[in-house]
Image: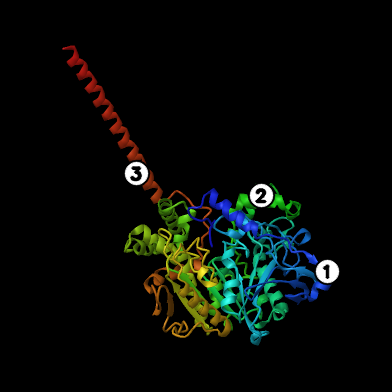
């Protein structure tokens, strides 16, 4: 979930309602007496005994710390493993969300927040003892533009997925967000010891995966069969992690939903956020920032959150050219499944206040993008949008969906397949019932998790049969590396066939979907144009034309008013003349 993670049509009452729902889920996991280590649903991990809860034959363990709290001297440093322990703890409640602005579109933001946020949650079936110790593990990384969200979001609750597929273990994680997880401090005074601060959120994810390797067998899972999956920024995360040396051996498969390596920042873009933090605080050194309290940093986070940055392509942790790394086989040993939704950009209709503001904003955004391109590329893109069957504005919406999501995802799939990596591609077309949304960003998530009542993106038309089919595909990929299921063979994606699974009211395989659009936009991939739009300029032709129409409209209204007034005065004079005669 990208940009400001805003949601359509939700006023204060809806915010209050959802805040109350999230707060009702909150609780503190308490320490228990040592003798409770043998209690029902107790699991021994290297950092303690954790007591879970059973519901409908599914065991849940929530709020387990996988690293030391990143506070005090550990703030803005790589995570350190949670210390070994034999203490006994409840695991009844989700850990606190990372610090962020509250936003109805990312319900994890409405849960209590803290710098001490590095926790994870595990769901495993109580029965099915035959698979115990060999269960495939799926680790979900939430989205939210690397600045919002949390594992407490009810959409990501793992109960229904594990109940339907009891041989699967599901893990969801929290990681640092915004200025706590993706702020480059290396350029400030004293920043030499903070060279990795721009990518801490990814390092948190790696630490969580290390915890899974050490402990998941105690829950019945197979540490040699781990699939990481995520959506939006989570899809970006799971696309980047195979390229990071420190993550090698921590997972076997990847499912990237509506997110790719395009969701990254250059060093220059990262510096823009750092400069803004210095401007807001008046502090140009790391020592001074370290002295700020959590509350002070939370307020700073709210002030600058429109400028949040994605992971930085630093050439050290993350390659300067992730596509090239995929093409050269950096992730060749990883089974890779990726895909996007047909109407990704329509997600922003809600955040922009409705269809009319959305159309205006899209036109302004598009023309800002054009200013970044060579003249020849602009001409090609303008022909693409001008010739679009639904009109130029919707052509520009389609262009942004392609540029930000579909083409980077497809390009990554092609690079991985070219290197010899096992690759699968999907294209989601099942639409929301919300006005104008279509198959927008995030619409597939309730289907994947089986949480069909979480319909803030889908509307009320969720198809339970489709949800069951999608879950079978996702979990079969986690089991075997092949998402094919009975009745729906899903071929591998490669350069010769370009076969993609189309997921809608019906399922079918098509070759080279929207290949003509891909041909237009693929040459722009290496520009890494992503949804960082905090510096949008209004000095573009669309705004000039709109301003001209507004001024013309005002002029016409003024002329009409003058003419009407003259007519009224003339009528009054005529009336007085008639009365006088």
For the point 22% across and 18% down, the residue is 573
Q: Is residue 264 visible?
A: no
Which residue is farthest front? 56
Mark 2 closeness class: few <14, some 14–19, many ≥20 residues within 10 Å: some
- Residue 170's disc number: none
| Side of 538 relative to 25 (left or right) | left
How far is mark 1 from mark 3, CA to CA? Answer: 73 Å
Q: Which labelled disc corresponds to residue 549?
A: 3
Residue that badge 2 annotates? 299
What is the secondary structure assignment of the residue under circle 2? helix
Q: Quadrant of the C terminus?
A: top left
- Given this view, does label 1 or label 3 mark the residue nearer the observer? 1
Q: Position of residue 540 (x, y in %)?
A: 42, 51
As drawn, the residue found furthest toward the top would be 580
Q: Is residue 554 visible?
A: yes
Please give the residue where the numbered disc 1 appears in the rendered image: 33
Front-most of residues 101 and 467: 467
Q: Residue 478 location in percent, x, y?
A: 57, 81
The quarter in which the N terminus is drawn is bottom right
Instruction: Assign a secondary structure to mark 3.
Output: helix
* Discs 1/2, front: 1
As measured in the structure, the alpha-carbon distance from the residue carrying label 3 to the one carrying label 2 is 40 Å
Query: Which residue is rendered at x = 56% and y = 65% of the image?
Result: 155
């Amino acid at each position: 979930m990208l940009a400001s993670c805003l949601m359509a049509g939700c006023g204060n009452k809806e915010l209050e309602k959802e805040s109350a729902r999230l707060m009702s889920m909150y609780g503190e996991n308490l320490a228990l007496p040592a003798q409770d280590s043998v209690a029902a649903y107790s699991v021994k991990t290297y950092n303690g005994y954790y007591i879970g809860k059973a519901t409908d034959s599914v065991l849940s363990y929530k709020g387990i710390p996988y690293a030391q709290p990143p506070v005090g001297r550990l703030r803005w440093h790589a995570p350190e493993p949670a210390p070994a322990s034999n203490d006994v703890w409840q695991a009844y409640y989700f850990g606190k969300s990372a610090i962020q602005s509250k936003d109805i579109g990312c319900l994890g933001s409405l849960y209590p927040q803290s710098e001490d946020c590095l926790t994870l949650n595990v769901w495993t079936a109580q029965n099915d003892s035959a698979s115990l110790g060999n269960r495939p593990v799926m680790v979900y990384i939430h989205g939210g533009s690397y600045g919002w969200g949390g594992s407490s979001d009810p959409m990501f609750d793992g109960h229904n997925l594990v109940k339907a597929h009891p041989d699967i273990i599901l893990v969801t994680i929290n990681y640092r967000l915004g200025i706590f997880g993706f702020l480059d401090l290396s350029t400030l005074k004293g920043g030499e010891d903070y060279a990795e601060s721009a990518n801490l959120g990814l390092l948190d994810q790696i630490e969580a995966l290390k915890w899974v390797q050490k402990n998941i067998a105690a829950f019945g899972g197979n540490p040699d069969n781990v699939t990481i999956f995520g959506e939006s920024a989570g899809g970006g995360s799971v696309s980047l992690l195979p390229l990071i040396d420190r993550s090698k051996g921590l997972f076997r498969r990847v499912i990237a939903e509506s997110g790719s390596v395009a969701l990254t920042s250059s060093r220059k873009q990262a510096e823009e956020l750092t400069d803004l933090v210095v401007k807001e605080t008046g502090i140009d050194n790391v020592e001074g920032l370290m002295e700020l309290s959590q509350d002070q940093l939370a307020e700073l986070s709210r002030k600058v959150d429109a400028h949040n940055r994605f992971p930085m392509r630093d050439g050290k942790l993350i390659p300067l050219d992730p596509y090239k790394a995929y093409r050269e086989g950096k992730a060749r040993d990883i089974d890779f499944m990726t895909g996007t939704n047909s109407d990704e950009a329509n997600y922003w209709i809600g955040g922009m206040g409705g269809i009319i503001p959305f159309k205006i904003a899209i036109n302004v955004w598009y023309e800002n993008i054009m200013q970044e391109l060579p003249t020849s590329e602009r001409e090609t893109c303008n022909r693409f949008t001008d010739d679009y069957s639904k009109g130029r504005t919707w052509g520009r919406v389609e262009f942004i969906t392609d540029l930000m999501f579909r083409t980077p995802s497809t390009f990554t799939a092609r690079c991985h397949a070219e290197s010899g990596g096992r690759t699968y591609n999907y294209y989601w077309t099942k639409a929301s019932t919300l006005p104008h949304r279509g198959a927008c960003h995030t619409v597939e998530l309730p289907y994947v998790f089986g949480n069909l009542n979480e319909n803030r993106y889908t509307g009320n038309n969720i198809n339970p049969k489709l949800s069951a089919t999608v879950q079978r595909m996702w979990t079969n990929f986690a089991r075997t590396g092949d998402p094919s299921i009975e009745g729906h063979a899903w071929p591998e994606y490669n350069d010769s066939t370009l076969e993609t699974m189309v997921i809608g009211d019906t399922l079918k395989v098509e070759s080279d979907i929207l290949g003509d659009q891909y041909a237009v936009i693929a040459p722009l991939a290496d520009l890494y144009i992503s949804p960082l739009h905090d510096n949008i300029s209004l000095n573009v032709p669309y705004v000039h034309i709109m301003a001209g129409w507004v001024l013309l409209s005002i002029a016409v209204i003024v002329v009409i008013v003058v003419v009407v007034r003259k007519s009224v005065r003339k009528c009054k004079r005529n009336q007085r003349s008639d009365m006088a005669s």
